[in-house]
């Protein structure tokens, strides 16, 4: 089957206009914040088992050369190098402060900006290119996705995960719902985050020439005191000034935060939508 032409894909065609006035790590989630590593790790605790299971099922293992793009604190990159037995893992991030301590012969740390990927020709090619909770925040994400697909060896996999919210249409007014909605709006207006873009990724991967494209959505349990509740609490506290700048009132935010810690908590949390595809091998 021929790849779907770009102009037939759902959503905004091409790579614009996806940019907010600021950028991830500048307008929000500055890397030097003392709790930023902990915030990322709360999410990693929840999502790493899902990511590992998916990567294992795609066959990742000894001999693979892997790129983790936007590697954060490096939990996936370290697992690839130390436990999955990948031959070499490149952990790339625009801020490598939390990755540097783990650098070694099999785990290369690379400081680079994914929005300037074309300026990194020596990065090489990979059997796995993985990016989790990164593309949703970046301007020009479709162009980046295509450049990432070009970095695949024949037979290699591109695996992309981003957040996907599944709100209950019957509950538009609870403090929890209004806080989540205000958060997505704030992220969109400040750094250009789009949590709907990931739904088009299967078509975009196919249009980029990848085969065996598939996707899955997993919503991990949200329990009071659990790591996912800790991640959202920390995220909302960090965003408090932006959330309260005309998008939400303090009483609603505080009620939502208290709900996250309460035994009344009963929600289908935002999930992780993972999309993957494989670069064709040349036909004999
Ligand atoms: C939400 S964290 C996700 C980290 C990791 N992938 C994970 O799932 O645990 C987003 C990461 O993307 C990185 N990032 C954001 N914009 C970037 C860019 N333009 N180029 C490279 N990395 C970027 C941030 O520094 C941060 O480490």
Image (spheres, rainbow, N blue to C red):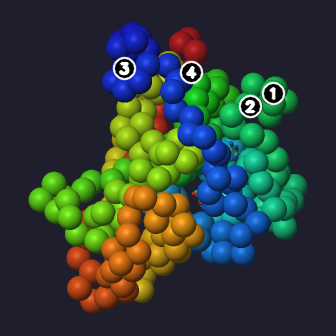
Q: Are marks 3 and 2 in contact (CB under 8 Å)?
A: no
Q: Is residue 75 left or right of residue 176?
A: right
Distance CA(mark 1)–CA(mark 3): 27 Å
For the point 75% across and 40% down, the residue is: 113
> Which is nearer the eye, 226 or 32?
32
Identify the element where label 2 is drawn.
Answer: helix
| Mark number, residue 75 | none
For the point 37% across and 26% down, the residue is: 11
Ligand 1 under 8 Å from disc 2 Cβ: yes
The residue singled out by tag 2 in the image is 116
Identify the element where label 3 is drawn.
Answer: loop
Q: Is residue 194 left or right of residue 123?
A: left
| Mark number, residue 281 | 4
Q: Quadrant of the C terminus?
A: top right
| Mark number, residue 9 | 3
Residue 87 lies, with reference to residue 126, above or below; the image says: below
Q: Are marks 2 and 1 in contact (CB under 8 Å)?
A: yes
Pointer 3 or 2: first along the chain: 3
Location of residue 39 (image quadrant): bottom right
The image position of residue 186, as x and y in percent, is 47, 53
The image position of residue 126, as x and y in percent, is 69, 35
For the point 74% across and 31% down, the residue is: 116
Pointer 4 or 2: first along the chain: 2
Pointer 4 or 3: first along the chain: 3
């Amino acid at each position: 089957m021929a790849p779907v032409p770009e102009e037939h894909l759902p959503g905004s065609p091409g790579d614009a206009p996806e940019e907010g006035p600021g950028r991830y790590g500048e307008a929000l989630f500055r890397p030097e914040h003392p709790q930023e590593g902990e915030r990322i790790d709360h999410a990693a605790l929840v999502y790493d088992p899902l990511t590992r299971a998916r990567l294992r099922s795609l066959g990742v293992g000894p001999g693979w050369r892997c790129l983790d793009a936007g590697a954060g604190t490096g939990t996936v990159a370290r697992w690839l190098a130390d436990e999955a037995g990948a031959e070499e893992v490149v952990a790339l991030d625009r801020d490598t402060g939390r990755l540097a301590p783990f650098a070694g012969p099999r785990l290369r740390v690379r400081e680079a900006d994914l929005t300037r990927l074309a300026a990194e020709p020596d990065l090489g090619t990979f059997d796995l290119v993985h990016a989790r909770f990164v593309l949703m925040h970046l301007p020009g994400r479709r162009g980046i996705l295509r450049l990432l697909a070009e970095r695949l060896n024949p037979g290699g996999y591109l695996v992309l995960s981003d957040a996907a919210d599944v709100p209950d249409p019957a509950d538009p007014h609870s403090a929890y719902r209004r806080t989540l909605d205000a958060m997505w709006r704030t992220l969109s207006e400040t750094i250009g985050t789009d949590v709907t873009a990931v739904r088009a990724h299967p078509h975009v991967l196919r249009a980029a020439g990848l085969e065996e494209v598939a996707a899955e959505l997993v919503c991990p349990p949200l329990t009071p005191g659990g790591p996912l509740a800790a991640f959202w609490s920390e995220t909302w506290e960090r965003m408090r000034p932006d959330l309260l700048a005309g998008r939400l009132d303090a009483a609603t935010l505080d009620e939502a935060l208290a709900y996250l810690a309460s035994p009344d908590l009963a929600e289908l949390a935002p999930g992780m939508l993972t999309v993957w595809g494989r670069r064709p091998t040349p036909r004999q």
